[in-house]
Amino acid sequence: MTSGDAADARPVVLDRRPGVAGELVLRRHGDVHELVIDGTFAMSDHLDGASERRQVDLTLAAARSPRRLLLGGLGLGLALDQARRTPELAHIVVAEVEPTIVEWHRSLLRPMRGGPLDDGRVEVRIGDVADVLAATGEPFDAIALDVDNGPDWLIRPANARLYEPSFLEVVSDRLTADGAFSIWSDRRVPALATALHERFERVDEHDVAVPRGQPDWLCVAAGPRRH
């Protein structure tokens, strides 16, 4: 199939299940896999997840000697795949609220992703990332959050708390002194960058070019301030 044929082809639904946030649909559009949650396009592996992979790289680079990473959201596994390419990481915790998405990685997505959940360094915790983070007493060297299209385009209403000062305070408390935290969004969010400046020593904003439309936005904060 040519790229033009792929662009014109109708998406093929691989599976459809009820989920925590509404109906979950995994579909294939040509050679691209897409995840739709409650009717909202959540993500695809178009361009092999260049934006998600860059988020992981930038987050780990901002942390000093990272050994423990928390990924907020499993999605199509692109961020996890990138994290697994970092041999220095000894423990990768993935917080995923949808059990079905985890199951897909052990079945339908396994041939494409190579069984990332079989990696001995990877631990999946089913639940909202805010609850997972609040429940653990373990410090993380890096935390990467990618569960929405941004704070202005939530996958589910409950995720609004992930961008509030109270959650950012929990994040800074759970990070090591040289730790780093990042948020992915499909657009710039100046208010969020300002909120991070209040809790971290350094905040860097990165635009990631996409084929059409405005760039994706990555905000990486390092050096949590202790209050």
Image (cartoon, rainbow, N blue to C red):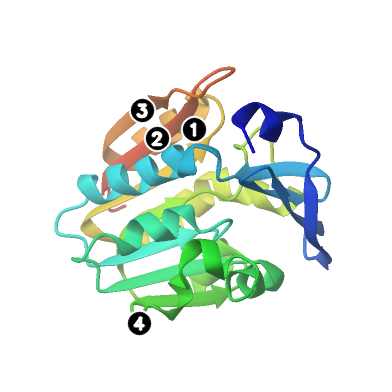
- Label placed on residue 179: none
Q: Contact (CB < 8 A) between labels 1 and 3?
A: no
Q: Amino acid at mark 3?
A: Glu
| Alpha carbon distance from label 1 to label 2 | 9 Å
First-in-chain label (2 vs 3): 3
Q: Contact (CB < 8 A) between labels 2 and 3?
A: yes
Neighbor class of circle 3 (other Cα within 10 Å; few <14, some 14-19, many 20+) is some
Q: Amino acid at mark 2?
A: Cys
> What is the x, y in percent for residue 200?
30, 42
Residue highlighted by disc 1: 192
First-in-chain label (1 vs 2): 1
Residue highlighted by disc 4: 120
First-in-chain label (2 vs 4): 4
Q: Contact (CB < 8 A) between labels 1 and 2?
A: yes
- Label placed on residue 205: 3
Instruction: Please say whether residue 198 is visible from this viewpoint.
Output: no
Disc 2 on helix, strand or loop?
strand
Neighbor class of circle 4 (other Cα within 10 Å; few <14, some 14-19, many 20+) is few
